[in-house]
Amino acid sequence: MNLTLPVCSHIHVWQLHIPCFRFELDRWFKWLSNDECERAQRFFRCQDRERFILSRGGLRYLLACYLDCAPKSLVFAYNSYGKPRLAIPDGSLQFNLSHSGEWVVYAIGFKVLLGVDIEQISSRTRLDKFRTRLEGLIEYCLTSNEQITLPTSHVERLEGFFKYWTLKESHLKAIGLGLSYPMTDIEIAWLPEPKLVIPAKIDQAPVGWTVKLWYPADGAISAMCVGQSKIQVVIRSFPGH
């Protein structure tokens, strides 16, 4: 299958529902590099191992479709914070991925900083022990302006927190620093639409940022952040399903 590379004003987002692609486990595992295979085998739980194989195999499938090459031939390099990129001289094609629970999301763009995150939160709303931890996370991750916007109800408070979390995580993945950058040094406003009020301070920072928040399924929330203003995000189901 061939895919057309996104133009500079577009980002392609692909959503993979893991239960629908378990039949690909053996085939996609054969595409992985030696280090990816070793990482897969280190997972103790079968579901974690399967999620890793399908998320990495799916990435190789997508990139191979865009680049018209064999999935096995792709070689990845990583920055010091673990963000992957293609180990080729031309770094124009940019990508990012995230997985949680039964979902994997991929973002593909061209010559732009981008990051994506997904969290499956439905099971956590039923965990009483998460209530205490949630308050600590709110204090650790959200600014005072953000904290006062959260509802008091535990379920709504949890969902409100993860709206901030996924968007901040996608932003930090876009700049390649991950959780090494303090989340409280970033601030988000939701009205009239989601916006980075205070983005991360980095060298050669983009003039503007585009952010998007959406729900792949009940109990799952996803966000992406792109280092370009007024960019169009196209969300699609994973090819072949």
Image (cartoon, rainbow, N blue to C red):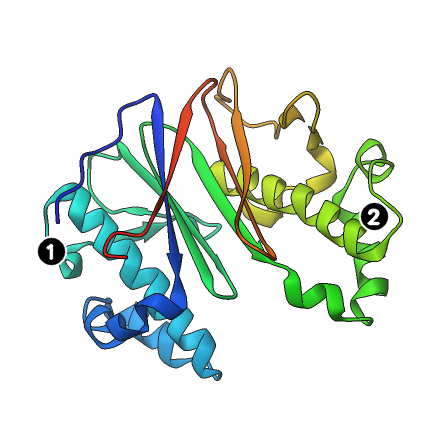
Toward the viewer: 239 or 85? 239
Which sits earlier in the primary sequence, circle 1 or circle 2? 1
Toward the viewer: 142 or 222? 222
Q: CA distance from mark 1 to mark 2?
A: 46 Å
Residue 29 appears in view = yes
- How crowded pointer 2 is (Cα within 10 Å; few <14, some 14-19, many 20+) is rated as few
Q: Amino acid at mark 2?
A: Glu
- Quick one: which residue is furthest to the left in this view? 69
Residue 50's mark?
none
Q: Amino acid at mark 1?
A: Ala
Which residue is the site of mark 2? Answer: 139
Q: Secondary structure at mark 2?
A: helix
Which residue is the site of mark 1? Answer: 70
Residue 75 appears in view = no
Left or right of 212: which side holds 188? right
Q: Is 108 located above or below residue 201 in the figure?
A: below
